[in-house]
Amino acid sequence: MAMTWSSLATSQPAMPIRFQCPECQAKLKIGSHKVGVRKSCPHCSVDFIVPEPVEGDLPIAQRWSGEEVAASPPTTSPPAAAEGSGKKPPRPNAAEPKLDSVNSAAPPMPRSRQSSPEMTPDILRLEEISVPRRMIYVYGGLIAVVAIFFFLFGVMTGKNLDQTRAVVVAKSIERSVIKGTVMFRRDNQRLPDVESLVIVMPIESELDVRPEGEALHPSQKSAVESPDAQLIRTFGGEVSRVDAAGRFSFDLPGEQQYEVLVISANQQSDQEVSRNLRVAWGRVFVPIEPVIGEQAHHSTRLRTDEESVVLPPVVFD
């Protein structure tokens, strides 16, 4: 009586057999006692019936159709290659997965993840994404517009910060105190130039009425309270005399530039009025000679950037 492979497999020790998955063509290995049993491919999860081994090429398992399928008789092996043809039988793959540990009831893989003969790993490629050139220009233009917007925003923000900082500085220096000393030299001694006259005038002030100036001469006892002094105060200036210690002081608005004119009460000079003095005070006094007369004088310019400004000592030789 002829014996089938299944009957031989049950009477003899199990031997490993090799075959191919009917779906993904993967090479698989399992014991011979599993011939005719339903199994699942560990690669694509397709169900199949373990085929009987054949000599030569690997057999392809039968796909599981949901019905019990009996083990088919062994197929005849293909004719051996002629000697000297150089063709060698395929070598078994040492890394082939074993199906002994695979659960036959494992759920199949989704069709989207199953491999197909047309999508083997050797020919898998990424699809190229094409973008119209016009869209590239549009995106580039949008990036440029956004960059320009943020640039202008930064410039405007910087200007606003500078203006805010300037306002803070101006508020912190609303008033500024100007101090100084006036001395004159006599017999190699430096003495306080008592009763000298100090006139301060903002540079940016525009006078529509000018004082005559004669009342502001140091020899005039009421120079500080004269109408000319009151007119100078109306335009943001100040008039004061030097005290017994040779000192003077003014309390003026901050963040402004001022012209300062010091006229000595105790020292005379035969020098003519300089051109710079006429330019600096010509907008206030025309002419300047009635204010100065023959007295020694000194003119300077200052800015009230701090709460207290100390002028260099003025010494008339």
Image: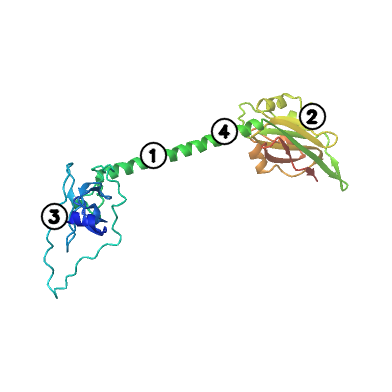
Secondary structure, mark 1, is helix
Give the residue number, with chain letter if any, for mark 1. Answer: 146
Q: Earlier in the sequence, mark 2 or mark 3?
A: 3
Q: Amino acid at mark 3?
A: Pro
Q: Which residue is mark 4?
A: 164
Farthest residue in the bottom direction? 84
* Residue in the foreground of this view, choosing between 103 and 315: 103
**Residue at 43% from the left image edge and 39% from the top image edge:** 150
Q: Earlier in the sequence, mark 4 or mark 2?
A: 4
Q: Which mark is residue 119?
A: none
Residue 26 visible in the displayed image:
no
How far apart are labels 3 and 1 at the CA level? Answer: 76 Å
Q: Which of labels 2 and 3 is toward the front?
A: 3
Q: Secondary structure at mark 4?
A: helix
Callout 3: few (<14), some (14-19), or many (20+) C-alpha neighbours within 10 Å?
few
Q: What amino acid is found at the position of numbered circle 4 in the picture?
A: Thr
As shown in the figure, which amino acid type bears the numbered disc 1?
Val
Along the viewing direction, whichever of 97 and 138 lies nearer the viewer = 97
- Which quarter of the figure has residue 305? top right
User: Looking at the picture, which amino acid does disc 2 mark?
Assistant: Gln
Query: In this view of the protein, which residue sits in the foreground, 30 or 275?
Result: 30
Q: Taking 67 as reference, is 226 left or right? A: right
Q: Which residue is mark 3?
A: 73
Mark 2 burial class by Cα count in 10 Å: few <14, some 14-19, many 20+: few
Decide: is 191 above or below 176: below
In this view, the residue in front, 274 or 162, is 162
Q: Residues within 10 Å of mark 1 (few under 14, many from 20)?
A: few
